[in-house]
Image (cartoon, grey):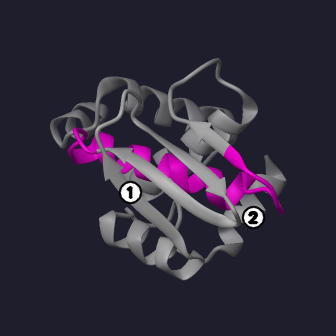
Amino acid sequence: MKLLRQKLEQLKIGWNERELGDEDVYRICRKHKVEIVEMPLRVSGFYYRVKGRDFIAINSMLTGKKRLAVMFHELGHYLLHVPESGATANFHGVGRRTRKEREADLFSLCALIPLTRLSETTSDELIDEGFDAEMVSERLEIFETYGL
């Protein structure tokens, strides 16, 4: 976890320091030349690399905090797990929860609910703001387990 934390802090994007939003996702993607594509999907989203180009596909039916959480989750795959070469794909919510999936979830939830927000806001208030109860519960578990 220490190496993951160092890698995320080196990005200098305000991760887990301030609440990140749509504009942050698009700014980071532009900087890294990752294209975001929204379309009707049977899954929430996925990250893929083909012919040296990186893409994040998002289900166009998603809205609000769920959409943003999926965008950050897939961006997390790019930032944390991108291969040096070759094709790859990571699907949100498909298959078992691997280490890479847990890391992408951690990246996403800490981007959306940074430590300061977690300490200043109750679970009920976060849910009232549009976070689903599972997201809030998982974010609290990340704090209790890793102190993030």
Q: CA distance from mark 1 to mark 2?
A: 26 Å
Picture residue at 39% right of the left edge, 34% below the top? 44
Name the kind of residue labelled 2 in the image. Lys
The reply, left or right, for residue 1 in relation to residue 111 is right
Evaluate whether residue 8 shows in this view: yes
* Pointer 1 or 2: first along the chain: 2
When the figure is inspected, residue 86 is found, relative to residue 6, above or below; the finding is: above
Q: Nearer the viewer, residue 31 or 55?
A: 55
When the figure is inspected, residue 98 is found, relative to residue 11, above or below; the finding is: above
Query: Disc 2 designates what residue?
Result: 7
The answer to whether the residue labelled 1 contacts the one labelled 2, judged by CB atoms less than 8 Å apart, is: no
Few, some or many residues within 10 Å of mark 2 (<14, 14–19, 20+): few
Q: In this rendering, which labeled residue sits more in front, label 1 or label 2?
A: 1
Q: Position of residue 10 (x, y in %)?
A: 71, 74
In the image, which residues are magenta?
A: 60-88
Magenta stretch, overall SS: helix
Tell me, for residue 69, which label it has, or none. Answer: none
When the figure is inspected, residue 70 is found, relative to residue 98, above or below; the finding is: below
Query: Disc 1 designates what residue?
Result: 37
